[in-house]
Amino acid sequence: MKYLIVIIFLFATISAFAQDHNDRPIVQFSGIVHNADSANVIVPYVTITNASSRNAVSLTNYKGYFSFVAHEQDTLRFTCVGYGQVTMVIPANVPNKSYTVQVLLKPQIINLPTFHVFPWATTDEFKKDFLAIKLADDDLEIARKNISRTSLTALSNVLPRDAQEIQSANAQGMHTSILNSHSLTPNPLLNPLAWGSLVKQITDGDNKSSN
């Protein structure tokens, strides 16, 4: 019997609330949401929750504008990430069944606690990885390696000559040509030293072949 009385009381309360909500006049609720610190800055995509109508949710557009149907004396909550919550109640006896407001949201700064992330499960693992770490060379050591004789020789074998080297070679050839323009060009076949060097090379080659 007690449970039956409780159930009847709950149904009566819900019916009275629904009847009271339906009896209130309907209002076209419209407005624009702005930043409270600067009235010229709009706040887009603000969530509007009607706490008096089963938490029905509406959303402002990218210009901060909203317009929907509500009832007089409805409680509305305006929430947006980065801003404080604003609660507003539609007044009773609204003329012309239309209620327009300008909602100002205050920017809110939330300081989160510092959180450190470590990739090591224990201190011993950290010590082991720290001792085994191989430090990279600093800028000075890298520069020394790049200008070492071995590095320069290896680069000269694979890199083509640049424009400056080609220009220097051409200039040297033109200079030699100008110096020899008024003199006879020596013929290597008439040079006994050249013949002696050629014979020596042939002899050395024959000796290597026989060995």
Image: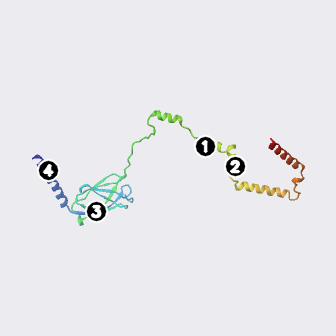
> Residue tagged by mark 4?
7
Figure quadrant of residue 52: bottom left
- 118 relative to 175 in the view: left or right: left
Alpha-carbon neighbours of circle 3 within 10 Å: few (<14), some, or many (≥20)?
A: few
**Residue at label 3?**
68
Where residue 197 sits in the image (x, y, percent)? 86, 47
C-alpha separation, residue under disc 3 versus residue under disc 1? 65 Å
Q: Name the front one of labels 2 and 4.
A: 2
Q: Which residue is mark 2?
A: 157
Identify the element where label 4 is drawn: helix
Give the mark nearer the N terminus: 4 vs 3.
4
Q: Amino acid at mark 4?
A: Ile
Q: Residue at x 53, y 35 (%)?
A: 132
- Return the residue found at the far left: 1
Residue that carries the numbered disc 1 in the rendered image: 139
Name above or below for residue 89 compared with residue 134: below
Q: Nearer the viewer, residue 194 or 140?
A: 194
Q: Give, as a three-letter code, the residue at label 1.
A: Asp
Q: Which of the 4 image quadrants contains residue 165? A: bottom right
Residue 170 falls in image quadrant: bottom right
Rounded to the nearest whole Å, what is the CA distance between mark 3 and mark 2? 78 Å
Q: CA distance from mark 4 to mark 1?
A: 81 Å
Where is 10 relative to 68, above or below? Answer: above
